[in-house]
Image: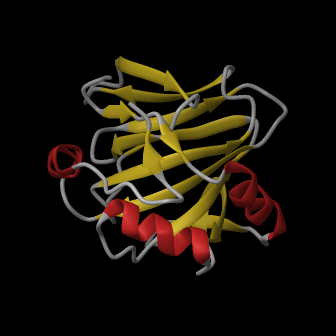
Amino acid sequence: MGRYYKQYNISWPEQEIEKTAFELEYERGADRAGILWPVDEAKAPECNWSKALEDFTGSQISRMFFSKVHWGGLPIHRDHNRLCALNFFVSGDFENSHNLFVDDFDEPVETFNGNKPALMNTRQFHGVQNRTEQPRIVLSVSFYEPYKIIKQRGFNNNEVFYIND
């Protein structure tokens, strides 16, 4: 566990979510000013697993989406529309692509790969390095409460999503 992220050993319907991720149509991501980002996004549909995920998080989820990052990655940035995110790593070469956190002077402070779902502090500068030919698809659940609060509150196990000790 790092300062800016916490990985969890969560059981989740990986195959069902992966199937959903590959069926959706993606659009180029853009910020509030309309500037395009090197990421494709698709809104997660309302379905049985998304309802179970809302129950698991204990929050009404107003923004849950799939993010597809291609070769190169996603530049260092700070999210302004959410405070933290729970990311499920759906498809890609996660051993060779990493999440990266940097300090205010662009010095790397933490990295991790996508071998387990992770709660991330999206207010800390972060990005994605993807030096593989495989697009990196992540299911991202947005939270509007601070990272420390969500991390301390924890999650509610159910039949679809649960934490393995």
Query: Up-down: is 65 above or below 14?
Result: below
Q: In the picture, residue 107 is in which quadrant?
A: top left
The image position of residue 79, as x and y in percent, is 36, 54
In the rendered image, the quadrant that contains the C terminus is: top left
Compare residues 92 and 15 and report the one nearer the observer: 15
- Tell me: 140 left or right of 47: left
Compare residues 118 and 127 and report the one nearer the observer: 118
The image position of residue 39, as x and y in percent, is 65, 54
In the rendered image, the quadrant that contains the N terminus is: top left
The image position of residue 7, as x and y in percent, is 41, 32
- Tell me: 7 left or right of 35: left
Q: Residue at horizontal 63%, vertical 78%?
A: 45
Residue 37 can be seen in this image: yes
Q: Residue at horizontal 41%, vertical 35%?
A: 8
Compare residues 14 and 110 and report the one nearer the observer: 14
Q: Residue at horizontal 27%, vertical 26%?
A: 103
